[in-house]
Image: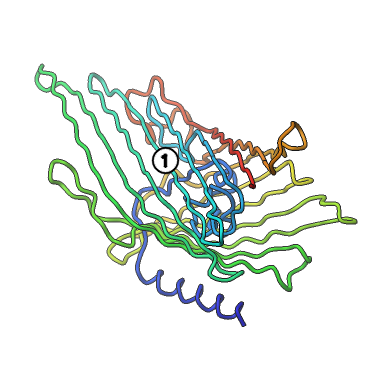
Amino acid sequence: MKLRITGFVLVLLVLIITEINAQSEIYFPSRFTRAIRMGSAYTGVAEGPEAMFYNTAGLAYNDYYSFLFSSGYGNAFIAEDMNVYDYALVLPVPGEIGTIGFSSVSLNYQYTFYSNFYSLSSRMYSLHYARKITDNLGLGISGNYYHTKVNNRFNLIGTEQTSTYTANSFDVGVSALLRINENLIEENDRFQMGIQLINILNNKIKWDTDAENKPSRIFRYGFSYLYNLNFNDLKIFKLLFAFDLAANGYDYSFIYLSPNFGIELTVIDVFHLSYGRENQDALKNYGSFLYPVNRIGIGVDLVLNKIIKFSEDAVLKIDYSSSNWEKITEDDPEIFFGDGENNKIGRGTFSVSLNVKI
């Protein structure tokens, strides 16, 4: 009975949210390495601290205190100099109260075009909370604060001019994750379905020049299936299949749809190999030269108390992802800003996380 109720609630949420709309940007940003190497098909996976960016509700099933650091960006939009650093912290609250998370994602880049200089620094700080409503359904909510700073230096009729602009915004995101462990192919298999909507408050981005940008949203829907193959209680390997559909647009109108999928093979709960692919179908005659993109990646889970003297149940996770964009090359002028002499595509992303169960 509980399973039927939770399934009905999730389906109802899908129907409501798809009527609201989604976020509009030229592309869908991808963060955190494990999710990137899965082709950003992570809404229905929602495991570990990576869940904060794709589906906060997944934190409700997280039993570990976790800290994650990730370097790299799942997009080819690169200027002459770019730095991307992301952090995440997960804190399960005792007593089945729920799970709290903190995350910070950043994007910094600069370029020079002839004698003109441009730089951008963007930060998003988020507070997350998730809780299991039933054994099969978790809900999540996130508060996100954005801060962006832009610096310009240019020559105008022989005179150097400088300008600085800043913008701030705040929004709220909601998410849900349905987990099913019964009546599947194998006893330990798992099916999950998740949704996330960012910016339900419809807040505008306000610049210190009194200018305002139209609010935007991202809606994600995804599902995953984890298949376990065991032999005499020995965990040989797992196969994780995932599919996501991200939509963005505004004014109740979709502009882009991004169907993504990923597959991950796990061997003896230690080694991970994955392939993912991100696509983007442009609607209403908008162009998209950044997609499709293929991702391949590896991961290693090191159980520390089996390697060194460590009293607690702790796992050190290391992930690496490499990306290949089919439509662009290092010399493609469309995707780069600036003079182009030092331009490069940041194909690799790396992350490391420590997970401790107390």
- Residue 139 horizontal side relative to residue 317, left or right: left
Q: Position of residue 73 (x, y in %)?
A: 47, 37
Given the current orientation, which residue lies at the most extreme bottom position? 1
Q: Position of residue 51 (x, y in %)?
A: 52, 52
Q: Position of residue 95 (x, y in %)?
A: 56, 60
- Residue 109 horizontal side relative to residue 99, left or right: left
| Residue 177 found in image quarter | bottom right
Q: Position of residue 347 (x, y in %)?
A: 53, 33
Count how many numbered circles sit on residues in the image.
Answer: 1
Find numbered disc 1 in the image and state the secondary structure of the residue it sits on: strand
Give 157 or 103, whichever is nearer the viewer: 103
Q: How is the image coloured?
A: rainbow
Q: Is residue 257 above or below residue 160?
A: below
Q: Amino acid at mark 1?
A: Val
* Residue at 58% from the left image edge and 44% from the top image edge: 34
Q: Is residue 3 above or below residue 102?
A: below
Given the current orientation, which residue lies at the most extreme right position? 232
Given the current orientation, which residue lies at the most extreme top position? 158
Q: What crowding class fits label 1: few (fewer than 14 Cα within 10 Å), some (14-19), or many (20 or more)?
A: many
Instruction: Residue under label 1, please give it.
Output: 105
Image quarter where the N terminus lies is bottom right
- Residue 325 horizontal side relative to residue 147, left or right: right
Give 272 or 234, whichever is nearer the viewer: 234
* Residue at 61% from the left image edge and 77% from the top image edge: 3
* Residue at 57% from the left image edge and 65% from the top image edge: 193
